[in-house]
């Protein structure tokens, strides 16, 4: 080979090698892997070696176990997608993602021990969680103690990012109680219902949500009335003493933030008592109790959240169809109607997972300081097509919210009431409030 051609061949080889080794060439793209091999009952990911360790802190036992099960399949989906594409290039190495479970049992004292274990013994790079705002407060504090990035994908209480509880290692991707309450109040300002009864869980989350709904209902619908208000202990098996007082109030809507076993009991027991008053809240789309009461009994209920499969966007349609196609192959417990489509809560969690991994990819590092620098003020087009913005001063997500009035039958479910077309509440009407005592937001 003559010298010019040798130089040309070397240049081509060098360029190909450089391109394949560049971050752009090695970047993963959401939903680009072959998901046909994903089995939620037998998830496959590395369990040792040089990996990106993600601690999934959630209840995997007890009355809140459905939360852990749900987020495990959502995180597993994202991890399978990214690992199948070769992982993420961080700190000069291509690494795959490992999931390490941490079972809180929905108990604060247990959650504290498990969060400590994830940080000290498992040495996770990042923690995602968790059900229960009272537990989330403990978890994000421990993560900050060990300088671990903590991603709150599901706890909504506003106080978690106030001057007392905020820390710069924690990012909330799921929004807040104030956002849920303002979006639903805005929605009902466009409807004829004017009499609301609040029934929530008797702990910080429930009271925070109830107060927020009263505040925003007054703002958006001044003529509306709160005709009753009650709070029941977490995981109450018998809600009859609380529900029996509602009919006399002439309420037109029952507003509730109940989740887990409580929302199941709320939906089923209210209908068993002959009540037809619509329920409204962030977790009312649970297909299990809606199926148990029969499709028509769920009509008129409303779900509000940060994601819904009925959100009309081509990218979201592609995502949910991909999910549903794989669901047809899954086995128990993931073959149920609960997982037929990515629900509001599950979808919100998955958006947060992909955003986290995209931030790590763009930071090019697992160094918490580099992740913080990349995520603060970030704008991200999620797997659903929605635009998310991470507010720099308090690490809260600014985004549109969605309200869907359940009906039966729909394309989503054949045995239960489910989503209708989402009513989109623009972000400007449901902004996460900035805590007055958070000094860094005053600069």
Image (cartoon, rainbow, N blue to C red):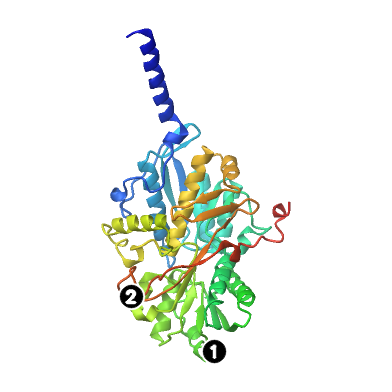
Q: Nearer the viewer, residue 45 or 105?
A: 45
**Residue picked out by circle 2:** 409
Tell me if I can see residue 232 in this picture.
no
Within 10 Å of disc 2 (Cα), the crowding (few <14, some 14-19, many 20+) is some
- Percent of width and height locating residue 69: 39, 59
Q: Total marks drawn?
A: 2
The location of residue 319, given as percent across then percent down, is 38, 55
The numbered disc on residue 47 is: none
Labels 1 and 2: the sequence-earlier one: 1
Disc 1 is placed on an element classified as helix
Q: Nearer the viewer, mark 1 or mark 2?
A: 2
Question: What residue appears at the point 53 percent right and 73 percent down from the top-left corner?
Answer: 187
**In this rendering, position of residue 389 left or right of residue 336:** right
Q: Secondary structure at mark 2?
A: loop
Camera-side residue of 188 and 54: 188
Above or below, 213 against 171 in this view is below
Q: CA distance from mark 1 to mark 2?
A: 30 Å
Q: Residue at x 41, y 81 (%)?
A: 269
Query: What number is the disc on residue 249?
Result: 1
Residue 146 seen anywhere in this rendered image of the structure: yes
Side of 432 where 58 appears, left or right: left
Q: Quadrant of residue 420?
A: bottom left
The extreme front residue here reads 4
Identify whether 67 is placed above or below 28.
below
Give the image location of residue 77, x and y in percent: 37, 51
Question: Which residue is farthest top?
Answer: 2
């Amino acid at each position: 080979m003559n010298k010019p051609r040798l130089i040309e061949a070397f240049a081509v080889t060098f360029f190909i090698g450089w391109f394949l080794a560049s971050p752009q060439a090695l970047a993963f793209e959401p939903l680009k892997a072959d998901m046909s091999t994903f089995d939620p009952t037998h998830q496959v990911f590395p369990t040792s070696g040089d990996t990106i360790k993600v601690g999934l802190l959630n209840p995997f036992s007890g009355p809140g176990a459905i939360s852990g099960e749900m987020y495990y399949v959502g995180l597993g989906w994202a991890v399978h997608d990214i690992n199948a594409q070769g992982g993420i290039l961080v700190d000069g190495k291509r690494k795959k993602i490992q999931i390490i479970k941490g079972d809180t049992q929905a108990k604060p004292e247990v959650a504290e021990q498990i969060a400590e274990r994830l940080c000290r013994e498992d040495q996770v790079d990042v923690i995602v969680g968790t059900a229960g705002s009272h537990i989330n407060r403990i978890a994000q504090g421990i993560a900050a103690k060990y300088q671990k990035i903590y991603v709150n994908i599901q706890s909504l209480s506003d106080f978690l990012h106030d001057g007392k509880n905020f820390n710069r290692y924690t990012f909330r991707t799921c929004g807040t109680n104030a956002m849920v309450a303002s979006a639903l109040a805005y929605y009902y300002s466009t409807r004829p219902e004017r009499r609301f009864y609040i029934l929530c869980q008797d702990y910080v989350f429930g009271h925070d949500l109830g107060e927020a709904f009263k505040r925003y209902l007054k703002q958006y619908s001044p003529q509306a009335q709160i005709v009753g208000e009650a709070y029941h202990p977490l995981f109450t098996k018998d809600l009859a003493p609380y529900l029996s007082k509602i009919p006399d109030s002439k309420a037109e809507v029952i507003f509730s933030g109940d989740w887990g076993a409580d929302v199941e009991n709320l939906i089923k027991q209210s209908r068993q008592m002959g009540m037809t008053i619509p329920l409204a809240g962030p977790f009312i789309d649970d297909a299990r109790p809606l199926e148990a009461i029969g499709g028509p009994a769920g009509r008129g209920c409303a779900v509000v959240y940060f994601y819904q499969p009925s959100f009309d966007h081509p990218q979201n349609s592609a995502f949910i169809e991909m999910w549903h196609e794989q669901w047809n192959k899954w086995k128990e417990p993931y073959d149920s109607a609960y997982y037929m489509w990515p629900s509001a809560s599950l979808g919100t969690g998955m958006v947060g997972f992909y955003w986290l991994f995209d931030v790590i990819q763009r930071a090019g590092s697992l160094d918490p300081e580099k992740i913080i620098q990349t995520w603060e003020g970030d704008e991200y087009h999620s797997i659903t097509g929605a635009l998310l913005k991470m507010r720099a001063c308090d690490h809260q997500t600014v985004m549109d919210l969605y309200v869907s009035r359940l009906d039966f039958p729909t394309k989503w479910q054949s045995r239960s009431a489910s989503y209708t077309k989402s009513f989109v509440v623009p972000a400007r009407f449901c902004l996460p409030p900035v805590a007055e005592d958070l000094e860094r937001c005053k600069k």
